[in-house]
Image (tube, helix red, strand yellow):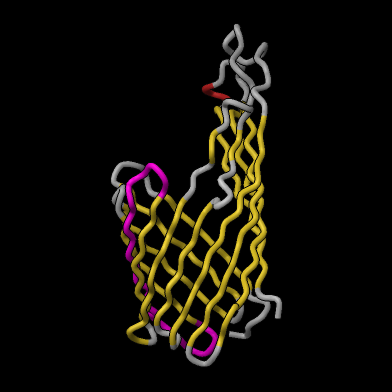
């Protein structure tokens, strides 16, 4: 009745190992947090088509550690401070006959910034749009474009194949490519009753591989 609500927590930090620290102890360099709440709902839905709208409210928090100071080991350094701001994302998703989907997503539409007056930096803004088509019941394809301000346009393509299904168990295989930079992705998904587990690996042409995991429990569906 009121749509779907979700919450998210993201954390990224950097530290120096004790073996590399001048003080002989592990030290925190920076911490980035993003706490979000999401809400999505159907604007229109009938037997053949649907139109949904959604938004995210995210609180971004950035905290730096201490400076090296005159000694160079941080013992006489100063606190470099912290900052926080609020970002708003919006998105729309339309479907036709459960075979074609068209979606668009705008990150940080309110142009949030961090920093003191005169030294503020805006958080990145990004526009993504994609179309997805299901030629067969067990195959889902997608192609999209992603544009960040002051950055090269990125193209993406992906396919998901349902490799096994029996009663309440489904297994999926996924493959994808994107440009700028060139990245290959592969993954697998499992759906058992109301639990979904997903894994993917991103292979970069320079950086080491990135592994991603996800677990989801659906309270509103029995399949």
- Tell me the quadrant of the picture where the C terminus can be found: bottom right
Magenta stretch: residue 175 in it? no
Query: Which residue sits at x=59%, y=32%?
Result: 30
The single residue placed furthest to the right in the displayed view is: 2
User: Residue 113 placed where, x, y %?
Assistant: 58, 39
* Residue lying farthest to the bottom in this orientation: 47
Please say if 20 is above or below 97.
above
Residue 66: percent from the left, percent from the top? 64, 21
Instruction: Give the percent coordinates (x, y) of residue 198.
Output: 49, 66
Q: Is residue 38 left or right of residue 94?
A: right
Task: Judge by depth and name the residue closer to the eye, 34 or 91.
Answer: 91
Residue placed furthest toward the top: 70
x, y (%) of residue 26? 61, 27
Seen in the picture, residue 125 relative to 62 is either above or below; the reply is below
| Residue found 70% across the figure and 76% down from its top | 2
Q: Main secondary structure of the magenta part?
A: strand
Residue 94 falls left or right of residue 177: right
Q: Residue at x 64, y 51 (%)?
A: 58
Q: Is residue 168 within the magenta segment?
A: yes
Magenta part of the chain? 148-169
| Nearer to the camera, 76 or 55 | 55
77 relative to 189, above or below: above
* 95 lies left or right of 135: right
Q: Quadrant of the N terminus?
A: bottom right
- Is 180 positioned to the left or the right of 99 in the image? left
Query: What residue sits 32% from the left and 53% below the top?
Result: 183
> How many labels were placed on the picture?
0
């Amino acid at each position: 009745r009121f749509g779907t609500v979700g919450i998210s927590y993201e954390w990224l930090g950097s530290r120096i190992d004790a073996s590399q620290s001048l003080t002989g102890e592990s030290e925190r360099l920076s911490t980035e947090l993003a706490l979000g709440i999401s809400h999505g709902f159907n604007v229109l839905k009938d037997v053949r088509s649907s139109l949904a709208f959604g938004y995210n409210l995210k609180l971004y928090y950035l905290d730096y550690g201490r400076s090296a100071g005159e000694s160079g080991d941080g013992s006489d350094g100063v606190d470099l401070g912290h900052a926080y701001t609020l970002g708003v994302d919006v998105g729309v998703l339309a479907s036709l006959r459960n075979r074609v989907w068209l979606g668009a997503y705008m990150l940080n539409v309110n142009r949030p910034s961090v920093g003191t007056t005169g030294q503020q930096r805006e958080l990145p803004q990004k526009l993504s749009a994609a179309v997805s088509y299901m030629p067969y019941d067990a195959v889902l394809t997608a192609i999209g474009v992603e544009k960040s301000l002051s950055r090269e346009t990125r193209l993406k393509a992906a396919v998901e194949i349902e490799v096994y299904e029996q009663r309440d168990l489904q297994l999926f295989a996924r493959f994808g490519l994107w440009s700028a930079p060139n990245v290959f992705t592969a993954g697998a998904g499992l759906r058992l009753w109301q639990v979904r587990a997903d894994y993917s690996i991103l292979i970069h042409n320079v950086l080491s591989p990135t592994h991603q995991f996800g677990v989801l429990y659906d309270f509103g569906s029995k399949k």
